[in-house]
Image (spheres, helix red, strand yellow):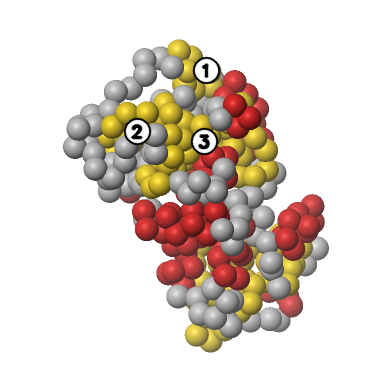
Amino acid sequence: MRAVLQTKQTLTVQEIDRPTPGENEVLVRVHAATVTRGDVIMRNMPRIAYLPLSLFGMRYKPTPGHEFAGVVEAVGQAVTRFKVGDAVLGTTTGLRAGANAEYVVVPESWKSGVIVHKPAALAFEDAAALPIGGMTAHFLLDKANIQPGECMLVYGASGSVGSYAVQLAKHMGAVVTAVYSTRNVNLVRSLGADDIIDYKTEDFAARGDTYDVIVDAVGKTTRAQRAQSLAADGRVVSVRSVTKENAAALTQLADLAAAGTIRPVIDRCYALDQINEAYEHVVAGRKVGNVVVQVVDSEGI
């Protein structure tokens, strides 16, 4: 099979042996995967840095890619939740092989990552862009215990986590202010934000408004900004905190996306052979939403 192999210096697509699922594992023919900010960060980390991260289910992957959507090709004898032909989406968190490849093997269930069934109405590209950003946003809003009618500010509303946070908060009945950059104004409006602030021309804290919840979706707000803008009983949640993946949450997100209640924001799609271009786009820091790697051309599905 064809798979991306990575070092700090290079990303190359090479022919390697197709994996075989173990007793409790699922072999997935990958239709779409992604390149995330986390993939870029982890690629550049020294190997020794993975020692403490292993406590949170992170490990170095010779083949990168933390999100995927595809079709089950084979299952181990002990697998009960999936069968050959099932469309699925999930993550490779904590595993030794990532999803920027034609096939990936994942356990039926494991502590760090998840795999769930994909609704038929959800395109593979959209499904692949859902797990990491969607589950992170879901985790943060759940942690903040957002309530209908509360005022929430999302800092970094045009990124993967932020775009999901805006949509989920609106679905939960919150009044949402989205902080974005100038070029993403149309996108942020389309997500349903009640108010928008361009961080390049205005400091949200200078407005004098207060919020019940501040979601820092990029980890860049300052302590002074948060102190100035948080209501007396307000809560702050940030991507800098440790989050957890949850199969029930991903299933809920997939159902919401299939129904059109939320939508994955896809910036660009690249073929597997364009993996270097995909990484360069993410490294440039101008990614909006998600960058998808099309392993199987959707027109040929």
- For residue 47, side relative to residue 236 (left or right): left
Q: Amino acid at mark 1?
A: Val
Image quadrant in which the N terminus is located:
top left
Whole-percent x and y of residue 226? Answer: 58, 73
Please give the residue where the numbered disc 1 appears in the rendered image: 13
Residue 294 image-quadrant placement: top right
283 lies above or below 273: below
State yes or no: discs 1 and 3 in contact (Cβ < 8 Å): no
Instruction: Tell me residue 7's x, y (percent).
Output: 48, 23
Q: Residue at x 74, y 77 (%)?
A: 207
What residue is pinned by disc 2? 84
Binning the other alpha carbons within 10 Å of mark 2 as few (below 14), some (14 to 19) or many (20 upward) gives: few
Vertically, is 68 above or below 170? above
Q: Is residue 227 visible to the viewer in this orientation of the structure? A: no
Kindly identify the amino acid type of the residue bearing the numbered disc 2.
Val
Residue at left offset 54%, top offset 73%:
172
Label 2's element?
A: loop
| Mark 3 lies on residue | 33
